Structures are given as C-alpha cells and as structure tokens.
Image (cartoon, helix red, strand yellow):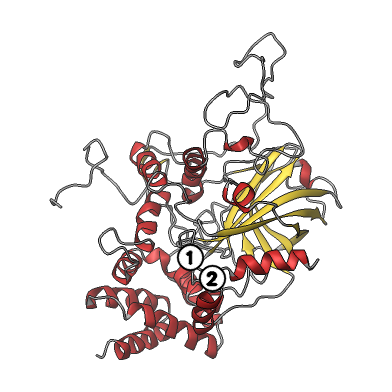
Amino acid sequence: MTQGPLTTEAGAPVADNQNSETAGPGGPVLVQDQALLEKLAHFNRERIPERVVHARGAGAYGTFTLTRDVSRWTRAKFLSEVGKQTETFLRFSTVAGNLGSADAARDPRGWALKFYTEEGNYDLVGNNTPVFFIRDAIKFPDFIHTQKRDPYTGSQEADNVWDFWGLSPESTHQVTWLFGDRGIPASYRHMDGFGSHTFQWNNEAGEVFWVKYHFKTDQGIKNLTAEEAVRLSGVDPDSHQRDLRESIERGEFPSWTVQVQIMPAAEAATYRFNPFDLTKVWPHADYPPIEIGRLELNRNPENVFAEVEQSIFSPAHFVPGIGPSPDKMLQGRLFAYGDAHRYRVGINADHLPVNRPHATEARTHSRDGHLYDGRHKGAKNYEPNSFGGPVQTGRPLWEPVPVTGGTGNHVTPLHPEDDDFVQAGNLYRLMSENEKVRLIDNLAGFISQVSRDDIAERAVGNFRQADEDFGKRLEAAVQALRGR
C-alpha cells in the first residue's frame, strides 16, 4: 500500500484520527465530524448478516424490581415507586468471536439490557467490566480490526492485538481485567454486569446527577482458568448459552442486585479522575454504590433467531429522566448502534416483537421500508398535522450540559490524577499472589506469540508503568517463553 496521509473514503486527508471533534475540550461530539461518522458507518457495514461485534450471544426475559426510592435523583417513571416492576430482556454475548465461536473465550461479555417501560424502551448497553480498552469511539473500528481475523491470514494475530494495545496505553486497565481471573466467566449467571459508561439522571426539579450502574450477581462470582476454558470450548462450545437456558427451565432464576454510583453534577469538573473517561472507574470510597433494585431472569425466548439474534439495543434509547454524558465512547455509540441495527436487521427492526415497546405504544411518522407491517394504516405521516396525529411534548428527556471552547479534535480532558496506568496498577496491587501469578501467565502466553521484539517490549512497558513489580515479572515470563 502506498505510503501517504490517511484520508477519508473520498480521498480528503484526515487531520486527527485519535480524537473526535467536540464542542470544547469536554463537550459532546459534533455531527460535523464526518471523518468519525464515515468511519463508524463503514465499520458497521463490513460483515453480513451477523453482528460485527457481540455476534455470539444468549438472552432471556425477566423482571426489574425497584427496592429504593430514587425520585430525588431521577424522574424516570419505572424508577418512581418502591416495589414497581418492569419487564426486561437481557442479551449476554462475547465480543470478538463470530456466531459459531465458543462461549468460554477470554473476552469481555456484552451486557445489553432492555427495560420495557411505560415511557418507552430504555436500553442499557454495557459489559461485564466497568471499563473499556479505549476512551474515544473514533478508535473503535481500529481496535476491533485487531481483535478480528487478519484480512491476509484469516486468523486472529497476536502481532495485531499487542501492536494496538502497546500503542494505546489507555487500554492497560481493561487488559489487566481481561487477563485476570474474571476474564473467562464460568457462566453468564456467575458474573457481574455494568453500564460501564457514565449517564445522566435528572429529577423533576431539573437537577442533574451523573450515575454508573452495577449489577452484582446473586449467584456469586465463578470463573474458569485458561486450561478449563480450552477444555470446555472443545467439549461444549455452547456452554454459557446452555447453562442459562437450563437454569431457567429448572426454575432456578438467576438474579442480580442493582446498584448505582451517584455524583452530583457540580462535582464532576473537579473530581480527581475524568468522570466521563471509559477507561476509568469511580473508586467506591469516593462514591459508594447504592442498592436500588433487583433484576431476575425468569423466561426463555421461544425462538433464538427471532428474539436473540434479531433483538437490538441502542444506548440512544433513553426515557425521561435519563440521558447521555459527554463520555466520547458513549457519544459515538449513540450513532453507531442504531446505524448497525438499521443495516443488519432493517429500518423497521424496532417493530419486531422483542424490540417494540411492551408497556406503551410507539407513535411515529416513519413509514415503509424493509419489514414494515402497515401498522399506521391511513394515518397522516407528517407533523404538525390537524388530523389528530402525535405531537411533541416540549420537554427534553435530559437536561442540557454546558459547553465552552472552540470546535476541534480535542484530546479528552485530563483531571488531577488522570493517567493511563494508575488504575491498572491499583487493580494489580489488589490481587492476591495466586491471582497475580495467573495474570502474568495469561499475559505472557499471549505476548510471547508476537513476531517482533519491539511489539513485545512496548506491551510489557505499559504494564511496567502501571506497577514496577507487574512489569518486571511479566518481562521475565515473556522472555522465558520466547527463549531469551
């Protein structure tokens, strides 16, 4: 391939491929960043018809029950009354593997939860980890390309994976999670879930709070070792899907205790970590998790294709009282998920039974296209109209976020204790000695497969910056496996 500047599909040079264009250094991403939108739109259309990511999954219906009054923080109706129950659908998944891959892979697990509320569907689309590999959506297609099959070899390549991670030090925290004991859950029932991103809650008075969601498994955490996972993947590649289905069939309904961390909006600007950086957590000592409810899964889908594979989730599906934050990964996903579903399932995917609202009715002026069922009959398809059509409410779902500064491709703002390694080091130091040994073995086994010394050295260097002992032990383990 000819060397030269990176360009758009139309051949225009790309000025910045690391940072999305935002309204000021900490503001929301701008629609005018066409390099970002083109990149995400192209990425969503690279494979047909399975999901580009999260292809391998399983799901179940359930019930969310509110156990604490949270009206002081949000006006969302499904969170308005202690004891109130809301129907849900939860899809679990691996990230990188294709539809036929094994469940017991070392990979983050997707946690896509749909609440069928009386104000419309609310989708909370996260993972089984509280952080992620990158903090800006403009890097997401590049990241996933390193995890998927190489276009030349047709296989996942250690060179690609560690070249990207080594050159993207913000991934160090999530990689430490992934190669630790929780990198391979024993089942979907035995892992926690997280909204991962920071979201906005707003109350009737218009006060704003930033929140993070946690779903703590009531079954207890159980994981597989690397050796157990290899064996299970060969014996039963459908292990997690089978376990979930059979547990519900037995009446052993899995459940999770739902917690939130809540930060008053005024505290965000001076918090020691950037609260909108997806590679960071909010330490529980700063913002203790508050229990607000219980999630139970109690009904299996009747048809996996119709209800699991055709289910769609979008972080842009909010309800009154809940909204986005300036998290740049979340901002990109607000576009990318809906765009992926319109391409993969069709423009009317929201009309399918698993996706349409269950506790209210969707009233839109959109018509026609693939899968359209004629539900609107002869109703007018424009607004305003004088024929009794639906009208706007005049009240946004969430409160505005102040922004300052000029437009541009801004680096994510740093807060006093922000760097790419501090929380990865904290996580390593929390581990027992046995956990550290397994972490080092898992990392070294993969890093040792790269073909170039500089890629291996750069990868190890990131972990050394997180913790000197971490890096020293990992370097020795990698050198031993590489015969140095």
Residue type highlighted by circle 1: Ser
Count of numbered badges drawn on the protein: 2
Quadrant in the picture for the C terminus: bottom left
Q: Quick check: can you spot residue 265?
A: no
Return the x and y of residue 71 as percentages of the image width and height: 79, 46
- Quadrant in the picture for residue 74: top right
What residue is shown at x 66% (from left), y 63% (from top)? 287
User: For this rendering, which residue is in front, 376 or 332?
Assistant: 376
As drawn, 349 above or below 281? above
User: Callout 1: 10 Å neighbours few (<14), some, many (20+)?
Assistant: some
Return the x and y of residue 376 as percentages of the image width and height: 66, 21
Q: Which residue is mark 2?
A: 237
User: Callout 2: 10 Å neighbours few (<14), some, many (20+)?
Assistant: some
* Mark 2: secondary structure: loop
User: For this rendering, which residue is in front, 65 or 203?
Assistant: 65
Answer whether labels 2 and 1 touch (C-beta < 8 Å): yes
Residue type highlighted by circle 2: Pro
What residue is shown at x 31% (from left), y 63% (from top)? 154
User: For this rendering, which residue is in front, 137 or 302?
Assistant: 302
Say left or right for 265 vs 148.
right
Residue furthest left in the image: 2
Return the x and y of residue 311 as percentages of the image width and height: 60, 47
Between the residue at mark 2 and the residue at mark 1, the CA separation in whole angstroms equals 7 Å
Return the x and y of residue 265 as percentages of the image width and height: 62, 48
Say left or right for 460 vs 404.
left
Among the two numbered marks 2 and 1 on one chain, the one whose residue lies closer to the N terminus:
1
Q: Which residue is mark 1?
A: 101
